[in-house]
């Protein structure tokens, strides 16, 4: 299941690995039935809502994190984001928008103090990207690759406690 992701990461194809990570998260969430499961028509990458994110098993998050961490020499991954969150004075697993905007997003290069990343292609898909910059978790619009900043924040807000609760840090 994770072979394609590992291949992209091994070859330092960061953009492809980022897209594959989001695709995997959607595939995993969609494969798990819930009590009010309504099949979703997902032809391309869309977004995950909070219920979808909660369905992703801890083990899946750990595997993806391990691959990102290993092939980026400790520069990228969910655990890297969690450690940076704490370094920015964020409480483990507790989202705070002020810290997210003024410290965390600046630290990892998602926000420069004036402007957020708005288009998917504006992420730094190189090995020189700031620690924690990837995976982006941005789930871009497939028509124009625009980033919906509110949904992007909500995705991180729901995933943050998962990073701590599943033992990534």
Image (cartoon, grey):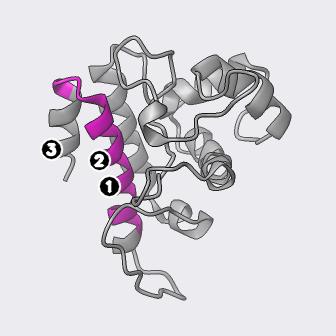
Which residue is pictured at 61% across the width and 38% down the height? 164
Q: Please state which of residues 164 and 129 is positioned toward the viewer in this rendering.
A: 129
Mark 1 or 3, nearer chain start: 3
In magenta segment, residue 22: yes
Q: Characterize the local packing of mark 2: few (<14), some (14-19) or many (20 or more) Cα atoms within 10 angstroms.
A: some
Mark 3 or 2, nearer chain start: 3
Q: Characterize the local packing of mark 3: few (<14), some (14-19) or many (20 or more) Cα atoms within 10 angstroms.
A: few
In magenta segment, residue 156: no
Main SS of the magenta part reads helix
Identify the secondary structure beneath mark 2: helix
Q: Residue 122 — which label?
A: none
Which residue is pictured at 60% across the width and 53% down the height? 148
Residue located beneath label 3 in the image: 3
Identify the secondary structure beneath mark 3: helix
Residue located beneath label 2 in the image: 20
Report if the CB atoms under discs 2 and 1 are less than 8 Å apart: yes
- Could you say where residue 116 lies in the image, as x and y percent from the top left? 65, 33
Report if the CB atoms under discs 1 and 3 are less than 8 Å apart: no
Asked if residue 39 can be seen in this view, the reply is: yes
């Amino acid at each position: 299941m994770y072979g394609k992701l590992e291949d992209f990461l091994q070859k330092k194809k960061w953009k492809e690995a980022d897209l594959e990570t989001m695709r995997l998260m959607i595939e995993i969430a969609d494969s798990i039935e819930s009590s009010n499961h309504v099949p979703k028509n997902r032809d391309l990458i869309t977004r995950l809502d909070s219920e979808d994110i909660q369905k992703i098993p801890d083990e899946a998050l750990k595997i993806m994190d391990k691959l990102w961490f290993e092939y980026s020499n400790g520069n990228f991954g969910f655990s890297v984001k969690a450690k940076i969150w704490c370094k920015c004075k964020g409480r483990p697993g507790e989202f705070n928008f002020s810290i997210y905007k003024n410290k965390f997003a600046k630290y990892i290069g998602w926000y420069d103090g004036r402007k957020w990343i708005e288009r998917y292609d504006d992420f730094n898909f190189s090995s020189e990207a700031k620690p924690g910059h990837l995976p982006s978790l941005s789930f871009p619009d497939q028509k124009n690759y625009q980033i919906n900043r509110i949904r992007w924040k909500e995705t991180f807000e729901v995933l943050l406690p998962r990073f701590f609760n599943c033992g990534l840090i």
